[in-house]
Image (tube, grey):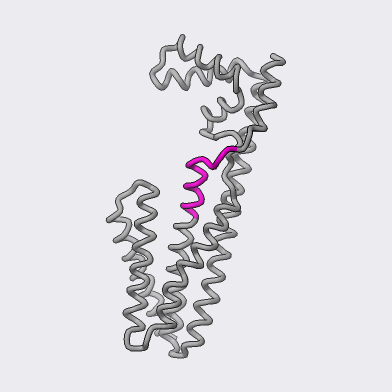
Amino acid sequence: MQVETHKSSQATKPAKNKMTMDEKLNALRAGVLGSNDGILTVVGVLFSVAAATTNSFTIFIAGLSDLLACAFSMASGEYASVSTQKDTEKAAVAKEEQLLQTNFEDEVKVVQQYYIAKGVTPATALAIAQDLMAKKPLETIVDVKYDIKLGHYMNPWDAAFASLFSAAAGGIFPLAAITLLPDAIKWPGTILAVCVSVALTGYLSAKLGKGNVKVAVIRNILVGIITIIIHYGIGKLF
């Protein structure tokens, strides 16, 4: 049992490898969501203000202020959310490390049941479980129980920076369109810029989530148009 405990404590300090797919997808997810929110929140403010005033500088300042606020808000939200997830993962690992020292045999049974559920015979599943738990107990049990890759916790900073920069980048498209386009094509040009931008984020989110690309793109475009109509209407009221 001393050997098992020693292996368990050593397993908490694995060599840091390259990012796992889950870690990469977490940053990409934050980036796509940040971009989409950046587009919609900025265009909402732009159309609200533009409906109430024709002063280009006022419209620009309002849009820029919202772009910055949105970017930092999305980043802080992602940081808080992923930090909570990371803390939860670490707490689960600490719990399993303790269980390995106090209830090792039950932990082996958990791994055995995991392989039985995959169609392996009980005897073979037990042999696999005993072998894995003898070599890398903590890594095995947290993977089986929680699908956690030991040493690869979600990084809140990756998610925060991805969200920060993507939200700012997404908001730049409608802001640049409504600020720089000639008056004759300002409105249709801005609407087109919004539709193209949200269609792109819909496409990326569908690809990342292995969803229906057509449905995601259409849904995002409809949400973008509805956002424009609502905020333009609110601006006209004042």
Magenta span of residues = 17-30
Indicate whether 136 appears above or below 219: above
Q: Main secondary structure of the magenta part?
A: helix
132 left or right, relative to 215? right
Q: Is residue 3 magenta?
A: no
Residue pictured at 58% horizontal, 19% vertical: 133
172 left or right, relative to 183? right
Q: Is residue 24 magenta?
A: yes
Q: Nearer the viewer, residue 90 or 20?
A: 20
Indicate whether 103 appears above or below 78: above
20 left or right, relative to 198? right
How far from the left and from the top, in percent, is residue 67? 52, 72
How far from the left and from the top, in percent, is residue 238? 44, 86
- The quadrant in which residue 174 appears is bottom left
- The quadrant in which residue 14 appears is top right
Judged from this view, the residue extending furthest toward the left is: 214
